[in-house]
Image (tube, rainbow, N blue to C red):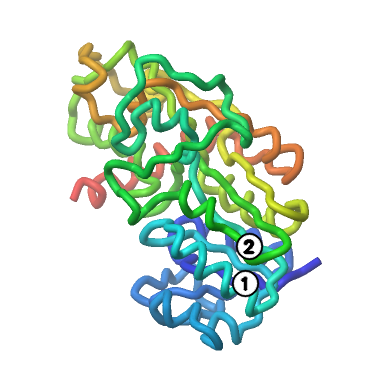
Amino acid sequence: MCARVLFVGGTGPVGQASVSHLLAAGHEVALAHTGRHEPPELAGLEHLHGSRAELLAPDGPAERWHPEVVVDTFAGGATAAKAGELAALAQRAGAGQVVAVSSMDVYRHCANAAVDGHEPAELPCDTLPLTEDSPLRTEASPVTGDTHDNAAMERALAGAPRLTVLRPGAIYGPQRSERVLREWYLVGRVARGEHRLPFPHGGTQLFQRVALDRVGRAVAAAVERAPAGRFECNVGDPRDLTYGGLARLVAERLDWSWEPEPVAWAECDHPWNARHPVIVDVSRLEQVLGVTEPDPIEATLAQIDWLWERRAELAG
């Protein structure tokens, strides 16, 4: 069944990746955002411009659009207050579903692994892979505090009969955004002619990644297939590479060689440098939402090629 889908935000990587799949399924889509960034790829859609407060205000542009589904990517940071604003909008508009794009960082295991500045635990206490029922962290990130806390946002989420929470891993994809350019850490070294590669713990770090297109497919699938009530869903690639494996794939693709230099875990700042591996179960994504594409290796190779073709502009 087609629906009127309102994206709060939506001009960033996740929104852009989702829109094509929503339109292909026949849904009507509008984007509510500040208007400061309006990619040409989103031309032809209805755009509602204003601050978040103005857009979500009682009888404001978002409510008057009468959405049946409200998707929030929480641009600028997820907070409990933003979740409250979203719930109030959904209730006033009579929306049947709220889709919140959260993150894998909500799990206690991620805090134990020192994600987002948490103090690492030498002995993690949760089993892998993490399921949607695994314990969540209760403390805000030491880095972002209460200005961006997906766990607090999730706890405050309400406002519709269907509450869908998507928890992506480390997103990668062909977008000019810091959120998805992590692989530039390796491709950029090749572009600069750097063979030396700081290599903590033998390159065994793993923070589960996810192709941007898979996240877009998950948003569209959630609108159609997420069950009634509250439904949390991990959004990750079904298989992934360790840091060492990813470095090797980059080298093979770009005909490069590395000179790994062993360093202490705390002395390296590569984007996947978690103290303990973060691996999640994606059964719900595949079996309930039906999302199985794209192939993670093919998507990673496409990302490497995309970065390499743009190495001159990205170097700046």
Proximity of marks 2 and 1: CB atoms separated by less than 8 Å? yes
Residue in front for this viewpoint, 252 or 38: 38
Q: What is the distance, in whole Å, between disc 2 and disc 1 at their CAs?
A: 7 Å
Residue 232 in view in this figure? yes
Q: Where in the figure is residue 144, as x and y percent of width and height?
A: 30, 49
Kind of element beneath mark 2: strand
Residue drawn at the location 58% of the way across and 67% of the way down = 87
Q: Is residue 205 above or below residue 308?
A: above
Answer with left or right where residue 267 lies relative to residue 83: left
Residue drawn at the location 62% of the way across and 72% of the way down = 90
Kind of element beneath mark 1: helix
Residue drawn at the location 44% of the way across and 22% of the way down = 277
Mark 2 neighbour class, 10 Å CA radius: few under 14, some 14 to 19, many 20 or more: many
Q: Where in the figure is residue 266, as x and y percent of width and height?
A: 22, 22
- Residue 313's label in the rendered image is none
Mark with earlier residue (2, 1): 1
The residue positioned farthest toward the right in the image shown: 1
Residue in front for this viewpoint, 228 or 168: 228
Q: Which residue is mark 1?
A: 90
Q: Is residue 11 above or below residue 239?
A: below
Q: Which residue is mark 2?
A: 98
Residue in front for this viewpoint, 224 or 250: 224
Residue 195 in view in this figure? no
Give the quadrant of residue 303: top left
Q: Where in the figure is residue 71, as x and y percent of width and height?
A: 58, 63
User: From the image, which quarter does the N terminus lie in?
Assistant: bottom right
Type of the residue with mark 2: Val
Give the quadrant of residue 292: top right
Q: Is residue 307 above or below residue 13?
A: above
